[in-house]
Image (tube, rainbow, N blue to C red):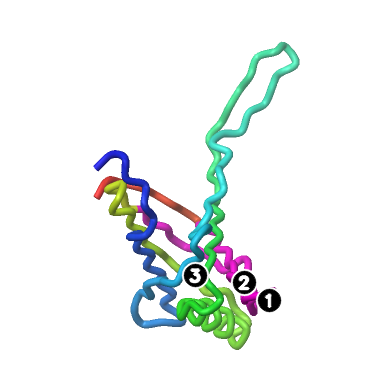
Amino acid sequence: MSGNLTAANCVFQLFIPDVFFTPQQLQGFSADDVFDVDSQEAVQTQMGVDGLLSAGFVYVETKQSITLQADSASNDVFDAWRAAEKSALNAFPASAVVVFPSLNRKYEMTRGFLTSYQPLASAGKILKPRKFGITWNRSDGAPT
């Protein structure tokens, strides 16, 4: 299905076992900014004094930001996650599956932590979207 780049049919399932018994499907994304994923530094390099470059594999985290409309019911998922952590004085890991039907791709993320939390929407003429950050231990993609 080439030439189809829609994000409208993207499905994002977030599972936080310490907070919810079942995965939560996120909905109500911002129109212009559903989510972002930072690029990763794939290897570490070091230049020797003789001008030869060496490189080595290193594990790196995946940083993702998720943007939800101020009136999205999925804001409650992040509010509950943060409230549970504050109550327990602990960090609760999550996992996620993101499916892009338009690309025939699925991504699985594991051992993610809520590393950025916007407690309420900013306000202007209208309420602005809320943004949340999750840092994932692993993110792997595959065709569906």
1 or 113, nearer to the observer = 1
- Report the side of 80 relative to 53 (left or right): left
Q: Earlier in the sequence, mark 3 or mark 1?
A: 3
Residue position marked by numbered label 2 in the rendering: 128
Answer yes or no: do the residues labelled 3 and 1 have beta carbons within 8 Å?
Answer: no
Residue at (24% x, 43% y) in the render: 1
20 part of magenta stretch = no
Q: In which quarter of the image is residue 100?
A: bottom left
80 or 69, nearer to the observer = 69
Residue at (72% x, 11% y) in the render: 50
Q: Seen from this angle, which residue lies furthest top?
A: 50
Q: Quadrant of residue 133?
A: bottom right
The disc labelled 2 sits on which kind of residue? Answer: Lys
**Residues rendered magenta in the picture:** 107-136
Disc 1 element:
loop
Residue at (28% x, 54% y) in the render: 101
Residue position marked by numbered label 1 in the rendering: 123
Q: Which of marks 2 and 1 is nearer the N terminus?
A: 1
- Residue 17 spot, x, y in % from top left: 41, 77
Answer yes or no: do the residues labelled 2 and 1 have beta carbons within 8 Å?
Answer: yes
